[in-house]
Amino acid sequence: MSKILLIAEKPDVGKELAKYFGSETKQKSGYIEGKNYIFTWGYGHILELLMPHEYNKKFKKWRREDLPLIPPKYKHKVSNGKKEQFNNIKNLIHRKDISEIVNACDADREGELIFRLIYYYSKPPQELLVTRMWFDTKEKNELLKAFKDRKPMADYNNLYNEAVTRSIIDWSMGINFSRLYSILYPDTYSVGRVQTPTLKIIVDRELEIKDFKPEDYYEIDGYFDEQKTKLYFDQKVSNNSIYDLEKGKSIFKTLSESTNKGIIDKLDKKRKRKSSPRLYDLSTLQQDANKRYGYSPKETLNLAQSLYERHKLLSYPRSDSRYLKKAMMAEIPSIFNSIASVINNDITKEIEENKLSFHQKNFNDAKVDAHRAITPTATKKSLNKLSYKEKNIYLLVANRFLEQYLGDYIYNLTKVYIKFEGYDFYTKASQDVDLGWKKVDSKTQESSVPTEWVQGLEVTKTNMELLEKQTTPEPRYTGQTIIKAMKKYNLGTPATQADIIEKLKQKQYITKKDKSFIALEKGIILIKEIVDDKIKSVELTKTMENQLKGIRKGTFTRDEYIEQVHEYVRNVIEETSVKENLFSTLQKNSNFSSNRSSIGACPICDAKVYEGKVNFYCSNQSCKFALWKQDNIWKKFKKSITKNRAITILKDQKINVKGIGTFKLVINPKDSQYLTRWDIDFNNKKA
């Protein structure tokens, strides 16, 4: 009897599919087998591009004369620690009773790449039928529908071409440019297609702040009938700063000493409406979570991913759309019911009792590419089962969904313009008429002007204030504002933006203080002095991302685009030469000593490990291994990882800590988020 093989991206999805589809299932090594179906899974990316030395051993040494490194054909290998699972999947693909293979990996370009590499490197029989299921939530009904509506693999060829092109150009630019600048200057530099322009945004702001020279200025507040107003110039209410200090004092003296009355030159009262904000995509969710709770972009992504994968309470979070497809209209009542089951308040009662409708502006098929907006699912589950932070993220998304049922926020806006001694004063006030969607999760600040004020009325000056102020620079980027900037310039995707920021911190290019990102010396030097203008250009990266999307749309071919990037890499390498003065400066700087020595070999890739300010890091740009000096586990025992301890750990994979026990380093290559962990033996008792 023939069977269908479903390949998921991660174990939890594979096991979820088995629960919904399988009958008489049995857990095997790396898969679950049922009567008609077999379910297996990857561990995210199971295969990765070869490193240069795996094409030729001589490339282990970084030499200028070997650049550019452009393999005649890009090849992949099974990632460390994942060979057993790859072989499990390969053997299943080659079973004679398999009649169809279904790609059940995540519905995005990386999910497509993960499946295709597994499939192609398994060298499957030619006659196999291969299909693709596409789902936005892990609910039973969605998975069953996605399986029923599965399409031929060929329908997603352009998506695969986009994905594999992205991985190749990132490898080509990252490997070649990182080696180029690390060879030319006395330090190891990590350079990337997206991370370097992102770093430039942060560095540019840092330099603006450092170069900023504050300037003194005055503002004048006038009080008429006790109502505060602001002096403004040139008929622009925003122009209220006086930089000529003597002039400011003179104006203030005239206004203060006058006993004349002012006159309301104009009073403009209008009714305003403001529609509800659109549903969340990942970027806007990260921005709001950072603004309200201080969560980093990475933390918000992990929380949303947990709500999607573990709790099944949110739709797929790595979305760049804020719209829904019209086909989803029928699902809206079920989603509302699930929200109302856990948020039973005046808002949900109002929606139910008045039979309010979900706003039609949210449906636009043309604005949904790979994924729809992030919404709650129809799954009903007590919020008590969520962590505090998970609950906060769920409520952000749920409240945004509820806002779509309510009407516009309506308010009266009053603008008042007063003439006094030939000068103009301005104030405005707003009063709520109908809170509409703002009833859900927003606060308003009402203000007013005296009810008797009308145009032409004389008003009494009751006070004047001279305010001494200084100009301030634009603030440093926060998690909210850097994600907004990355979205503006098309830097990365919702799935990768948080990781890019974390990588910049790991490479000690930036650090974070409170909510703000601060560019460090190494990052500033890389951007200001070292990297070619095109590499750090946000406009170039934006163009490249648009061209990648062109491959998906079929307007650009994979081969021609890769060759364009190769030619660009060749040109940069050919045209770049060392700046001798800069080299000498860096060499003298102890932070960039060329005489530094390795403290040991990386336990994952065997590359050299060096000491940094906050960690001991692998010099291999593609390896994420690091030992953090203030490791959270060690901190619990009021200990840190010193240089001597790090040397012992790298040599023996363990170290005895007096008074505690033996700390054993465990590598988890299958888990990109928690690459390392510690097993501790307390007096021969494992904890």
Image (cartoon, rainbow, N blue to C red):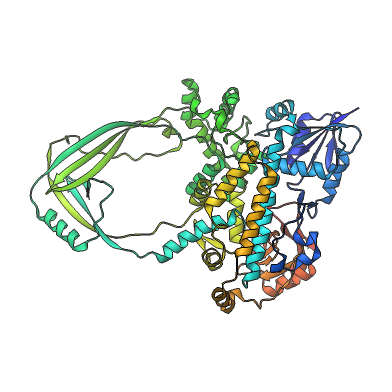
Find residue 63 and report its horizontal and vertical position in percent: 71, 69
Find residue 542 and report its horizontal and vertical position in percent: 55, 48
Quadrant location of the N terminus in the rendered image: top right
Looking at the image, residue 306 sits to the left or right of residue 245; the answer is right
Residue name at image x 27 percent, y 39 percent: 429
Find residue 226 and report its horizontal and vertical position in percent: 18, 46
Image quadrant assignment for residue 623: bottom right
Comparing 513 with 630, the one in front is 513
Residue name at image x 41 percent, y 66 percent: 211
Res 680 visible: no
Looking at the image, residue 326 sits to the left or right of residue 31; the answer is left
Residue name at image x 68 percent, y 39 percent: 159
Image quadrant assignment for residue 552: top right
Residue 629, compared with residue 362, is above or below; it is below
Find residue 280 and report its horizontal and vertical position in percent: 53, 38
Res 249 visible: yes
Q: Residue furthest left?
A: 259
Comparing 337 with 186, the one in front is 186
